[in-house]
Image: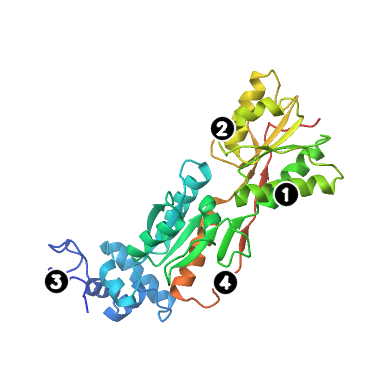
Amino acid sequence: MPQESSPTSPDPRRGRPANGRISMAAVAAIAGVSGQTVSRVVNDSPRVDPATRERVERAMAELGYRPNRAARALRTGRSQTIGLVVTTLATVGNSRMLQATAEAAAERGYALTLVTAASGVADAFERLAEQEVDGAIVLNEASAQVSAAERPAGLRLVVVDAPTDAGVVAVHSDHRGGAAAATAHLLGLGHDTVHHLAGPADSFAAIEREDGWREALAAAGIEAPEVVRGDWSADAGFAAGAVLSSASAVFCANDQMALGLLRALSEAGRRVPEDVSVIGFDDVPDAANYRPPLTTIRQDFTALAHRAVGALVAEIEGADGADASASVIPTMLIERASSARR
């Protein structure tokens, strides 16, 4: 069985060994426990009481101990690596999810491998299987391809933005509820109706947000205007300005399209919010610095990533209570200066 490297100094506090790696034995000596106890802490065994675990973790931090990933993989049969499948990182949502997922994985002791689905999700799955990942998270646009894609046996999956009946563990923000809240907010400001600049027709998130908008209008007894569809980009929002320039209230399916729309309305001589109220979705970091600052629906990307990684790790490690049902992360209306009473 592979062993952690041994220290070359009798006092583990006196510098690092020549090979640069601190051993479990050195950690055990500092913590005053057995090597087996250190091993249990490293492998996150429940058979360690909290006080002992804390003492071992303090010793690890003091010595700068890093577990031998290769040795752990041979012991556990796991690579401690998960894959992330995306179609693009050009959208703000995907790039923020990449960062949040990497951080959530690291907190659980897992490395992250990124693959793009440029040649399809099935090809991405094969590449991940070749790298012997323990499981994978599929993001947003790539999620639509999962049900039709053949995946290698044993590859555990969690899908971000997929319907609850997709046959996989699914996690998503409350797109529908957030869209309904945005629409109800605009109606509550006295607008007769709310127009919608929607995302791509094949996007789960876009469909959910459009449905939420329609439901809020229906609840108010208002017939939904014709949808204007974009591709999530600011350019699409700017182009939509030609159609939406006479609207009094617009709910945009994301903040990037709202940014383009704000520019188009300004160039058309329409003031926001005096003439037109505009709401976005996502609450990107720059939304508060748009002109005017953008009212929007906030997605909690950190919570979304932690829920997805937590669900996948539970599947990988066979945790009791692993839940295969969908998890829905709440959204929140953030009111700023781009929406005002009619």
Amino acid identity at mark 1: Gly
Dot placed on the residue nearer the N-terminal end, 2 or 3: 3
Query: In this view of the protein, which residue sits in the foreground, 221 or 34?
Result: 221
> Distance of mark 3 from mark 4, alpha carbons?
48 Å
Which element is circle 2 on?
Answer: helix
Q: Are marks 2 and 3 in contact (CB under 8 Å)?
A: no
For mark 2, what is the residue?
234
For mark 1, what is the residue?
212
- Please tell me how crowded label 3 is: few (under 14), some (14-19), or many (20+) other residues with Cα within 10 Å: few
Dot placed on the residue nearer the N-terminal end, 1 or 3: 3
Dot placed on the residue nearer the N-terminal end, 4 or 1: 1
Q: Is residue 161 left or right of residue 6?
A: right
Dot placed on the residue nearer the N-terminal end, 3 or 4: 3
For mark 3, what is the residue?
10
Q: Is residue 114 left or right of residue 15?
A: right
Q: Are marks 4 and 1 in contact (CB under 8 Å)?
A: no
Which numbered disc, 2 or 4, marks the residue closer to the eye? Answer: 2
- Please tell me how crowded label 2 is: few (under 14), some (14-19), or many (20+) other residues with Cα within 10 Å: many
Amino acid identity at mark 3: Pro
Which residue is at 42% across, 71% downward? 153
> Distance of mark 2 from mark 1, alpha carbons?
22 Å
> Measured from the top left, where is residue 22 in percent x and y?
22, 66
For mark 4, what is the residue?
323
Query: In this view of the protein, which residue sits in the foreground, 173 or 54?
Result: 173
